[in-house]
Image (cartoon, helix red, strand yellow):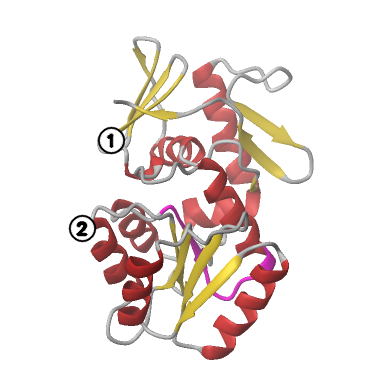
C-alpha cells in the first residue's frame, strides 16, 4: 500500500487507451494508480507494491487476468481483485468468483461504475483476508448460506428456494451494504443479453423475503432502495 491515505489500485489491461482513461478517473476519485499492459507485468507489480486492489482484464498477453489472479492466490496474497471481462456467461462469472475474485465488470462499462465497484469492494474487504465470495459458509444473524452446496438455513430450517433465488441470496450476501441495481442483478442471474426484464429480479427478491419472513417495510436483511435497486443490510461474516 502506498504511504498515503489514498488507497492504491493496480490496473492491468493491454489496451493503453483503457488504462490511461481509467487511471485518470481513479486518480481524480482519490486513488493512487499503477498501470500494467500485460499480465506478467501486472503480477510482478502486484507482488512488489502490494496494492490495496487490482483491476485485471481477463484477456491479456503473456498471462490473462484469471491467471494473474490464480498466481496471487497461490502466493497467499488476498489483495482484492476486480476482473474485467467481455463475456456475460454465468460460467465465466462463476469461475471468476470460485478462483477468488471479489467482483467482475463486463466491458464496455462506465468508468464511474468501476469507481463505485472499487469503493464497494474496499469497504467490504479486510486486509490480507479472503473475500466473502471465497468462503464456504456465510453467516448473517440466524441466516446461514453454504456457497459450495448452494443451500441455506434460517435458524435450523432449510430454505426451499428456486435455483435463481438461491444464487441471488448468495450474491446479496457476498455484497453486503452495497446498492445493487435491478439491471446488475438481472445481468448476474440471466446474462447481459437475456430477454428477461427486471420484473424477474423483483420476483426473486419477493421469493427470498417470503422464505426469510423479511418485512420489506422494516427489513432485517433486504432493503429496497426506491427507483434504484436492493441492498443486503445485515452484517455478513465467513464461518470460522
Q: Mark 2 falls on what kind of element?
A: helix
Residue 22 in sight here: yes
* Nearer to the camera, 80 or 183: 80
Where is residue 185 shown, x and y percent of the image?
56, 49
Question: What residue span does the magenta drawing correspond to?
Answer: 102-112
Q: Nearer the viewer, residue 3 or 156?
A: 3
Mark 1 closeness class: few <14, some 14–19, many ≥20 residues within 10 Å: some
Residue that protrudes farthest toward the front in the picture = 3
User: Dot 2, how many residues are within 10 Å of its Cα: few (below 14), some (14-19), or many (20+)?
Assistant: few
Residue 233, x across and y down, in percent: 61, 29
At 64% from the left and 62% from the top, the residue drawn is 115
Q: Nearer the viewer, residue 219 or 159?
A: 219
Query: Where residue 175 sits: x, y (%)?
Result: 52, 42
Q: Residue furthest top?
A: 156
Q: Residue furthest bottom?
A: 16
Can you tell which mark lies on residue 74? 2
Report the side of 196 relative to 73 (left or right): right
Q: Indicate yes or no whether the magenta region holds residue 103.
A: yes
User: Alpha-carbon distance for marks 1 and 2?
Assistant: 18 Å
Rendering coords of residue 70 (x, y %): 25, 63
Q: Which mark is residue 57?
A: none
Mark 1 element type:
loop
Q: Residue at x 28, y 56 (%)?
A: 99
The answer to which quarter of the image holds residue 37 is: bottom left
Residue holding disc 1? 136
Q: Are marks 1 and 2 in contact (CB under 8 Å)?
A: no
In the displayed structure, 109 sits above or below 211; it is below
Tell me if 43 is positioned left or right of 214 in this view.
Answer: left
Q: Earlier in the sequence, mark 1 or mark 2?
A: 2
Amino acid at each position: 500500500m502506498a504511504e498515503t491515505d489514498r488507497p492504491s489500485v493496480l490496473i492491468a489491461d493491454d489496451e493503453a487507451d483503457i488504462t490511461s482513461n481509467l487511471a485518470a478517473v481513479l486518480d481524480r476519485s482519490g486513488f493512487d494508480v499503477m498501470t500494467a499492459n500485460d499480465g506478467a507485468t501486472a503480477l510482478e507489480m502486484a507482488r512488489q507494491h502490494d496494492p490495496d486492489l487490482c483491476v485485471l482484464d481477463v484477456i491479456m498477453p503473456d498471462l490473462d487476468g484469471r491467471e494473474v489472479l490464480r498466481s496471487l492466490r497461490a502466493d497467499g496474497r488476498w489483495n482484492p481483485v476486480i476482473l474485467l471481462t467481455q463475456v456475460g456467461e454465468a460460467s465465466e462469472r462463476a469461475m471468476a468468483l470460485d478462483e477468488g475474485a471479489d467482483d467482475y465488470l463486463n466491458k464496455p462499462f462506465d468508468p464511474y461504475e468501476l469507481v463505485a465497484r472499487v469503493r464497494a469492494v474496499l469497504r467490504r474487504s479486510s486486509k490480507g483476508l479472503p473475500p466473502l465470495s471465497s468462503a464456504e459458509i456465510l453467516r448473517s444473524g440466524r441466516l446461514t448460506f453454504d456457497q459450495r452446496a448452494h443451500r441455506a438455513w434460517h435458524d435450523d430450517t432449510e430454505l426451499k428456494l428456486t435455483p435463481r433465488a438461491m444464487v441471488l441470496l448468495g450474491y446479496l450476501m457476498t455484497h453486503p451494504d452495497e446498492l445493487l441495481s435491478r439491471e446488475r442483478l438481472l445481468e448476474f442471474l440471466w446474462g447481459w443479453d437475456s430477454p428477461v426484464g427486471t420484473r424477474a429480479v423483483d420476483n426473486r427478491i419477493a421469493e427470498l423475503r417470503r422464505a426469510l419472513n423479511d418485512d420489506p417495510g422494516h427489513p432485517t436483511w433486504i432493503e429496497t432502495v426506491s427507483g434504484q435497486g436492493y441492498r443486503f443490510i445485515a452484517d455478513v461474516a465467513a464461518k470460522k
